[in-house]
Image (cartoon, rainbow, N blue to C red):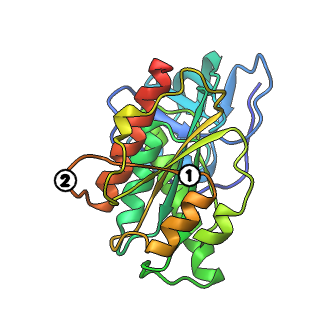
Amino acid sequence: MFLRNGPAAAFNNGGNVAGLRAYHPFPVPPGATGIVLSPGESLHLARSLRARPGEPIEAFDGAGRTWSGVVLSPDAQGLAMRVDSARVRTPLVPALALAQVLPKGGLMDDIVRAAVEVGVAAIYPLFSAHCEVKLDASRAAARVERWNAIAIEACKQSGNPFLPRIASPEPLKAWLARPAGKALRLVGSLEAATPALSRVSIAHEEVEELLALIGPEGDFSPAEYALIREHGVRGVSFGENVLRVPTAALYALVALDQLRQRGN
């Protein structure tokens, strides 16, 4: 059974050496022996990556389902792949999440890419007092669309089959007011006498999400730190050195990923 899907944007798979990867966010019935990819994906695979018949390829839906096989027909309008095996992966628990005050320039693009490679499940872009990025509704929607495209590209490059949920940018205060559920929320803090991130443990806690809150280039204001603490977000130090925003975000996510793998 071959399934044809609707149009989709083309994305770069980062030159992945393990074979071709394609994003296929459309239902595939159990037992399907083949998939026809969207015109956007097909054009990129056939023209830019020069896909050839018999070449290994993997399709993924962003929700943990993957289909492995080989290219049958590298048609630029509808590349056909044979499905040899299918797999469903279960998300890791606790989930990783990032709440990031928007940095200047294109740094958020780099942060989204790195966060997906680590395996983040949700990204919350925020505005704060010292945030220099200003977005109206139209520009914010365009940014989220761009970040989703970058996330797909990062999934292809890294082999991560899970696309994160990327929320619309909102003020820090509004985000803090939302229910936290069973989340352990940590904020990277430059305040004196802040305990080290390495001292955090989840061994005796029921935690469903590990979240890192990272501030802007100018840090959070004293009033914002007070509000953050008021909402139960714990301050942690990343060491003696002051880290750039993208470095701090990656540092925190890698540390939290190691924490959930150890489970302590």
The Cα–Cα distance between marks 2 and 1, rounded to whole angstroms, is 22 Å
The residue closer to the viewer here, 255 or 156, is 255
* Residue 23 vs residue 208, the one in the foreground: 208
Looking at the image, do the residues carrying marks 2 and 1 touch, with CB atoms under 8 Å apart? Answer: no
Quadrant of the rendered image containing residue 16: top left
Residue 253 location in percent, x, y? Answer: 42, 41
Residue assigned mark 2: 241
Picture layout, residue 23 above or below residue 146:
above
For the view shown, which residue lies furthest in the left direction? 241
Q: Describe the element under mark 1 as helix, strand or loop.
A: loop
Q: Where is residue 17 in the image (x, y as percent from the top left)?
A: 32, 30
Mark 2 burial class by Cα count in 10 Å: few <14, some 14-19, many 20+: few
Q: Which residue is drawn at 37% across and 25% down?
A: 18
Residue plotted at (73% across, 43% down): 181
Q: Mark 1 points at which residue?
A: 233
Q: Pick whichever of labels 2 and 1 is earlier in the sequence.
A: 1
Count residues near mark 1 (Cα–Cα under 10 Å), then give few for <14, some for 14-19, many for 20+.
many
- Residue 170 to residue 238: above or below: below
Residue for point 66% across, 33% down: 208
Q: Quadrant of the N terminus?
A: top right
Q: Which residue lies furthest to the front in this view?
A: 193
